[in-house]
Image (cartoon, helix red, strand yellow):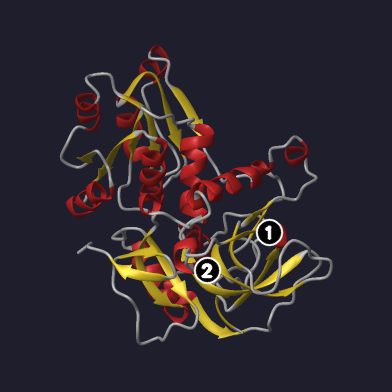
């Protein structure tokens, strides 16, 4: 099979296209013909090195967000059939460590991540546990489905599982234009919450407003906390979702109402945040860390996105920044590193190398239509 892998750590140029033996599904596994694979920051981090996941080994095939068709079943596999169209839950818990035994599989001590520390979706074929595949309803395309797992999984964990966002509340989301932020806007809007979004790019703010953000805030030229209070009658936001890190941690705290919640799930601007402790404890602020989705939470997110079984609906439609052939994985990594993306970058095995799709797209149904993003 054709695959993209890296045999050493470094820049995007370390990604190589080559031929690997076709994988064979083991007991309880399925073999998937990859139709679309999303590109994520984890792919960049693992490529740059040192690896952030235990058990990582070179050479490595990245790609955690996978949608495709089942083409073979391993011994004893039940519940799936050849020809099933599926999206993959990439986080595979061990099932017997203390965290798993306590029902906290999202914090598994020996977690395997498809595309993280086992072979992933930058390939024509991949094997995954059958239990970690979810059927795609008719009308839901592979590109749309491959845009879900990481971005929507993280937004779901942050907003719903940890943040407990409710209808009528106001949520402030940082990093407008990223896959996680777009997913957060979609999820929050469907829940019935009011959404404020920040970004340093006027173009991204304009795009987020078109996507349904009620208020957009330029974090380079405006006072985030003042705008958040202005938008909420002086009270402040009920919840802040921060996947940026230390750069906006203190403004996030000042944007919250009394006893508000700050959910953080990223460290794009650094690993250490400093903030005003008295402000946080005097106002009863709750700080909540959010990681990856557990098995049940991921299933709940997929059910939420697929709604009544009719596929991904208009108000919850993943936005794809760029579609590229698998052979253009290096360009995909460079695009993500540029910070200019608005939505997901998706690799498509079998797509002609001469036909990369220009940004940006809205993935819907079985095709991809050009959106109105400039």
Closer to the camera in the image, 141 or 176: 141
Q: Along the line of sight, which residue is nearer the eye, 185 or 136?
A: 136
Q: Could you tell me which secondary element the residue under label 1 belongs to?
A: loop
- Closest to the observer, 279 or 360: 360
- Residue at the spot x=65%, y=42% of the render? 107
Residue drawn at x 37%, y 34% is: 192
Q: Give residue 15's mark.
A: none
Residue 257 place in picture, x, y as percent? 33, 20
Image location (x, y in percent) of residue 35: 52, 74
For residue 111, side relative to residue 174 (left or right):
right
Quadrant in which the C terminus is drawn: bottom left
- The answer to whether residue 309 is left or right of residue 285 is right
Most distant residue in the left direction: 221
Residue 181 position (above or below residue 64): above
x, y percentage for residue 160?
A: 49, 36
* Residue sticking out furthest to the top: 282
Query: In the drawing, does residue 160 fall left or right of residue 296?
Result: left
143, 230: nearer the viewer: 143
What is the quadrant of residue 239 in the picture?
top left
Q: Position of residue 190 (x, y in %)?
A: 40, 41
Image-quadrant location for residue 108: top right
- Label 2 to label 1: alpha-carbon separation: 15 Å
Badge number at residue 9: 2
Residue that carries the numbered disc 1 in the rendered image: 55
């Amino acid at each position: 099979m054709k695959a993209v892998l890296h045999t050493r750590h470094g820049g995007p140029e370390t990604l190589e296209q080559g031929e690997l033996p076709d994988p064979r599904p083991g007991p309880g596994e399925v073999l998937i013909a990859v139709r679309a694979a999303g590109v994520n920051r984890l792919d960049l981090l693992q490529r740059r090195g040192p690896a952030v996941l235990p058990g990582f080994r070179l050479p490595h095939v990245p790609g955690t967000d996978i949608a495709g068709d089942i083409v073979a079943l391993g011994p004893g596999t039940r519940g799936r059939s050849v020809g099933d169209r599926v999206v993959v839950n990439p986080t595979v818990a061990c099932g017997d460590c203390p965290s798993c035994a306590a029902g906290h599989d999202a914090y598994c001590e020996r977690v395997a991540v498809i595309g993280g520390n086992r072979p992933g979706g930058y390939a024509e074929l991949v094997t995954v546990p059958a239990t970690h595949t979810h059927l795609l309803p008719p009308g839901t395309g592979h590109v749309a489905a491959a845009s879900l797992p990481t971005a929507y999984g993280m937004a779901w964990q942050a907003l719903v599982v940890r943040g407990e966002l409710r209808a009528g509340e106001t949520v402030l989301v940082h990093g407008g234009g990223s896959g996680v932020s777009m997913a957060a806007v979609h999820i929050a809007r469907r829940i019935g919450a009011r959404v404020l979004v920040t970004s340093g790019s006027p173009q991204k703010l304009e795009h987020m407003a078109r996507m349904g953000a009620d208020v957009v805030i330029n974090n380079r030229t405006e006072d985030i906390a003042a705008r958040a209070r202005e938008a909420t009658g002086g009270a402040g936001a009920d919840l802040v979702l921060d996947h940026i890190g230390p750069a906006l941690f203190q403004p996030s705290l000042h944007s919250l109402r009394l006893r508000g919640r700050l959910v953080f799930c990223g460290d794009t601007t650094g690993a250490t945040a400093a903030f005003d402790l008295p402000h946080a404890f005097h106002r009863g602020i709750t700080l909540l860390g959010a990681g990856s989705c557990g098995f049940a939470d991921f299933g709940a997110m997929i059910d939420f996105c697929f709604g009544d079984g009719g596929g991904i609906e208009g108000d919850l439609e993943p936005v794809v920044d760029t579609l590229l052939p698998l052979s253009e994985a290096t360009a995909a990594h460079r695009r993500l590193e540029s910070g200019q993306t608005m939505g997901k970058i998706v690799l498509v095995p079998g797509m002609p190398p001469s036909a990369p799709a220009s940004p940006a797209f809205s993935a819907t149904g079985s095709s991809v239509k050009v959106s109105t993003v400039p």
